[in-house]
Image (spheres, rainbow, N blue to C red):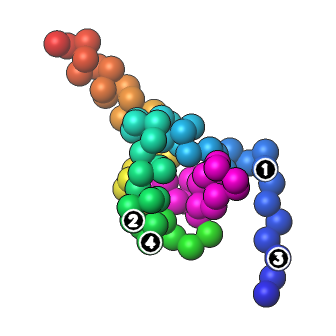
Amino acid sequence: MKKLKIDLNDEDYMGSHEASTMWGKQKDYVRTIYNKYPKRFPEGTIRKFGKQLIVTREGMETVTGIKKSQLAEIKRNKAKHAAEK
């Protein structure tokens, strides 16, 4: 088995709260989905370290169906719709 080298400075790895809010979800979204439906996350995209869940960009994109590259546009559209009200 080949060992993976992980760069913890890589922005594709994030804590569950950070990932949840980045994707516009409640801060406990990742933890809730992981506890109820752990198989939704592809193998190797989420891991628990003590009490902390670390998730990858790929895991979040798979679970939410939203690419990280789309997040800025989605936030702009939400802000635009909020301003129109």
Cα gap from disc 2 to disc 4, whole angstroms: 6 Å
Q: Residue at x 48, y 50 (%)?
A: 31
Which badge, 1 or 2, is on the more N-terminal residue?
1
- Residue 26's place in the image compared with 7, above or below, is above
Q: Can you tell which mark lies on residue 37?
A: 2
Q: Earlier in the sequence, mark 1 or mark 4?
A: 1
Label 4 sits on what residue type?
A: Lys
Number of numbered discs overlaid on the protein picture: 4
Residue wearing tag 1: 8
Which of these two is toward me, 17 or 45?
17
Q: Is residue 52 above or below residue 45?
A: above
Report if residue 71 is visible in the image.
Answer: no
Q: Which residues are magenta?
A: 45-61
CA gap, disc 3 and disc 1: 15 Å
Work out how far the residue at label 1 is from the one at label 4, CA to CA, in angstroms.
24 Å
Magenta region includes residue 21: no
- The residue tagged 3 is 3
Quadrant containing the C terminus in the rendered view:
top left
Name the secondary structure under disc 4: helix
